[in-house]
């Protein structure tokens, strides 16, 4: 039986590094901005109950003209992922607070 290799390790040419650093900086800047914009209970619950996490953020925000659409979609997906994980933690915390007997009190 032969094995299929799905990924290969490769090193990018060093002349691409400045462009990648710029891309990552732009991505981080806009992701942080969107998280600040959508960090409220309404949006956390809305995205927590949604299967498509990037689309509501994309529709509610405006893509900067200098950011390509594929990069913007990736930024929206990252932000949606952060908010969805916050929703999961919020739900677990509320369930624990409803039943304090589930939490072991330190002795």
Image (cartoon, grey):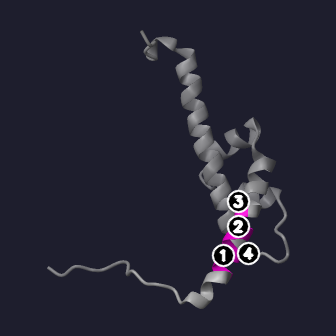
Pointer 4 residue: 69
Pointer 3 residue: 55
Side of 16 relative to 31 (left or right):
left
Q: Quadrant location of the N terminus?
A: bottom left
Please tell me which residue is depicted at 71% across the width and 69% down the height of the picture: 25
Pointer 1 residue: 21
Categorize mark 4 by other alpha carbons within 10 Å: few (<14), some (14-19), many (20+): few
Q: Is residue 50 visible?
A: no
Dot 4: element? helix
Dot 3: element? helix
Cα distance between the residues tagged 1 and 4: 19 Å
Categorize mark 1 by other alpha carbons within 10 Å: few (<14), some (14-19), many (20+): few
Pointer 2 residue: 27
- The majority secondary structure of the magenta stretch comes to helix
Q: Is residue 102 visible?
A: yes
Residue 12, horizontal then vertical, whole percent: 51, 86
Question: What segment carries the magenta color?
Answer: 19-28
């Amino acid at each position: 039986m032969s094995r299929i290799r799905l990924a290969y390790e490769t090193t990018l040419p060093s002349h691409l590094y400045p462009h990648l650093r710029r891309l990552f900086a732009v991505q981080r800047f806009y992701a942080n901005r969107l998280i600040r914009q959508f960090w409220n209970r309404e949006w956390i619950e809305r995205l927590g109950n949604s299967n498509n996490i990037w689309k509501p953020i994309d529709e509610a925000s405006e893509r900067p003209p200098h950011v390509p659409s594929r990069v913007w979609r990736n930024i929206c997906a990252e932000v949606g992922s952060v908010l969805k994980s916050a929703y999961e933690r919020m739900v677990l915390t509320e369930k624990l607070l409803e039943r304090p007997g589930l939490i072991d009190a330190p002795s």
